[in-house]
Amino acid sequence: MRKEYRPADIEAHHYARWEAAGYFKPAGNGTPYCIVIPPPNVTGTLHMGHALQDTIMDALTRYHRMRGHRALWQPGTDHAGIATQMVVERLLNREGTHRRELGRERFLERVWEWKERSGNTISQQLRRLGASVDWTRDRFTMDPELSRAVVEVFVRLYDDGLIYRGTRLVNWDPVLQTALSDLEVLSTEERGKLWHLRYPIADAPESYLVVATTRPETMLGDTAVAVHPDDERYRHLVGKQVALPLTNRLIPVIADDYVDPEFGTGCVKITPAHDFNDYEVGQRHGLPLVNVLDANAALNDNAPEPYRGLDRFVARERVLADLTAAGLLDRVTEHTSMIPRGDRSGVIVEPLLTDQWYVRTKPLAAPAIAAVEDGRVKFVPENWSKTYFEWMHNIQDWCISRQLWWGHRIPAWYDDRGNIYVARNEAEARSKHDLGEDVVLRQDEDVLDTWFSSALWPFSTLGWPDKTEALATFYPTNVLVTSFDIIFFWVARMLMMGLKFIGDVPFREVYIHALVRDHEGQKMSKSRGNILDPLDLIDGVDLDTLLKKRTDGLMQTHLQTGIEKATRKEFPQGIEGVGTDALRFTFASLATTGRDARFDLSRAEGYHRFCNKLWNATSYVLAQLEGIDAGPAELAVADRWIRSRLDATIRAVHEDFAGYRLDLIAQTLYDFAWHELCDWYLELTKAVLTDPAASPALRRGAQTTLVEVLGAVLKLLHPLMPFVTEELWLEIAKHRGRQSPTVMLERFPETGDFATDAAAEEEIGWLKGFVSGVRQIRGEANLSRSVPLSLRLADASALDRERLERHGAQLRKLAGLEGIELVEAGANVKGAATALLGGMRILVPLAGLIDVAAERDRLGKQLARTQDDLGKSRRKLENQSFVANAPAEVVAKENARIAELEQRAAQLAQQIARLAEIAS
């Protein structure tokens, strides 16, 4: 066995061996268990959210694999339409060309070339994280089999009247020239202006209504002004008309509940072709749709002639100038509003009226709502079902077409008269509609929204539309692990499609994990400069490289300077790698039921020390196995205690896996392995294993318990920490002459494998309490471990005396004692520190052990500092302005600090009083 724990020495080696041996494939005849990976973008790299999510999925998969289930973690990647097309277009731009110069066919060849060469980075990174996916089943959303499933679903939905082509508003990116999903639009607060415009009343030209807008150029497409039906100021104008400035049009005044009478003047311009809310108002009132922008976000021929061809922002300035000249600009105010930008291009997105393909969602949503209502699908935590229902009950038709070349091309063909023929291929279109070769057909240029193919993921990856063995075995899958931000975009759509095409839900449970934030609770982002690369945490990274990663591409100098300063302060020496296991264990500990998970590198460093603790413990255990034989074994009370504690630990681990509480599993296993096994049991075994007079049977009992308990711990930890547990398990197997190729195929410990023993737990609990009491006194009196102590025990019961007789030698060794004396009941020992153990008092006379004057001075200074801090905190809470304005959690934290300081001050005062007693 290697002397030191070095993650790099073992991780890559074991993963390659596992994959080559096929250990990740479903095996055996056990109950099927399946998770499908949320397919990461083929352009992507592993980020902190992936690392958390993948740790959870891998832990669940390894747990069920070890329990004998036929476990399949289905891997794959998404073709990521816009993202991938942009990557390749940028490459072409560097070469001095453009996709339209290449043409569609050659461009797609270039995309496939890029994908094969460098588009699977994240798959390699998943291996670094230890993901036990079945790579032999790796899928890509553009694979021929998955593309066939996409076409099949489109055609069937169209034939069922659930897909149609229509003219509606979409999020339009004028740079990328495509519709975007809501998830591809990032809305952020930006400072701007609010222009108040005068709309003259038609039959009273000297009077006017004032409307406020952040987009003056779109007024050219207004088709109404709306007021609230209960607004007394304007009720007499409803039904009348106003003159739309700069045009020759009259538009009506309408009443609609959408209007907030308290905002602005209570009058709202309605532009149904350029605002999603206005579109809904327009539909309710039968308003015409006047689109004044083209695909480049320039004014089109529906705008008055002076503005045609102008970019939207140039047109804005021209419109404002003309309104000012006409005396129709009432006033301008500063205003903050949410501005939507394309997540890829960064350009402001336009609501634009275009012809697109849509899925009619309400008929599909009803069964998906029912599946959650009746419990066929459960959300964990359950409160996320409310979010799901809110979205699903207000669902709108889904725009599924994108104006891209990379993606699943829409299986629809057009003739010269504009007739549409939907079919699986052109030959079927001709056959289906009896079209001769003289009829020229052209296929739709658009591709499908990436979420369309992703919605089929749970069954397309298993071979549908064919009736495959994998589909019959693993569908429905067991759990979907994902984040809350795609409940609607992905989770809901998978439910709709699974119920429609398979007749059953795609998964039984949806586990919504937290979002990873930095140690201060801030969202990780490039602009904040607080991003962390999971691989840097695993391998380590020097400061210069970390700085470059965090500031590369940032144009604002002040951002770069601030990020560099913060990074140098947080990581002055860069980041020392902690290894995969420590990072995974950190993510497991963060997998709470909360919405946010704060990542702190110090926690990962602590779990690296935990791995090292396991390494050293295994080294100790292996050293104790020398000379073990097959004779009878007798279990000492310490052996029975650790076995009983292990049984309780195993029970808790199973319960928490069932509840997806990996945070509780991590805490339970950490506490058992570090504190009960290493800190206590290993120490307790030394009395037997190093005592020449100990019976062989007791020695064998300790040896057997050591190896069995450690082996069980490694198996319990394996789902969370696969590499170090594999290395240590194989070392144990080698020393015991066992044929065990991998711990991941070992049977997971079950409740009842180790006997519960309440008597042993009570007895060792007494021993631990005794030793801890003495250690507490040492700490309070500032006495080092090397100073031997003489104890007085007062008020000891008969049971205390029996236990003292049995464990006296252990107590002397563990607590560093040179003598233990029983004194009469009720006795007091002058100047003695006291610890209580049940009804017994543990007394440590301090006279002669400490320098009373120096100790009084030290404690006095501590008390003074504590009282000073206490005064500051109390004054802060006495400040009504602070209490009224500070966040509730800050006030609560200050109250907790006061309670802690009060307790500390009382303890110090008590210790000082004891010193006075000694001095007297």
Image (cartoon, rainbow, N blue to C red):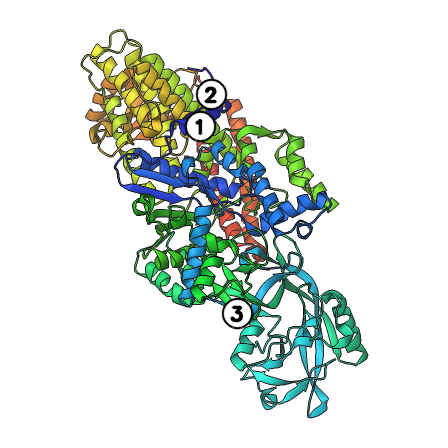
Q: Look at mark 2 in the image and give the residue it sits on.
A: 5
Tell me which label, 3 or 1, sits earlier in the chain: 1
682 horizontally vs 292: left or right:
left
636 horizontally vs 147: left or right:
left
Q: Which amino acid does label 3 sit on?
A: Asn
> Residue 423 is drawn in which quadrant?
bottom left
Q: Do the residues labelled 3 and 1 touch (CB within 8 Å)?
A: no
The N terminus sits in image quarter: top left
Identify the secondary structure beneath mark 2. Answer: loop
Tell me which label, 2 or 1, sits earlier in the chain: 2
Of tags 3 and 2, which is closer to the observer?
Answer: 3
Place of residue 6 in the rendered image (x, y in percent of width and height, measured from the top left) = 49, 21
Q: Look at mark 3 in the image and give the residue it sits on.
A: 419
Q: Which amino acid does label 1 sit on?
A: Tyr
Extreme residue toward the right, this view: 325
Q: Look at mark 1 in the image and give the residue it sits on.
A: 15
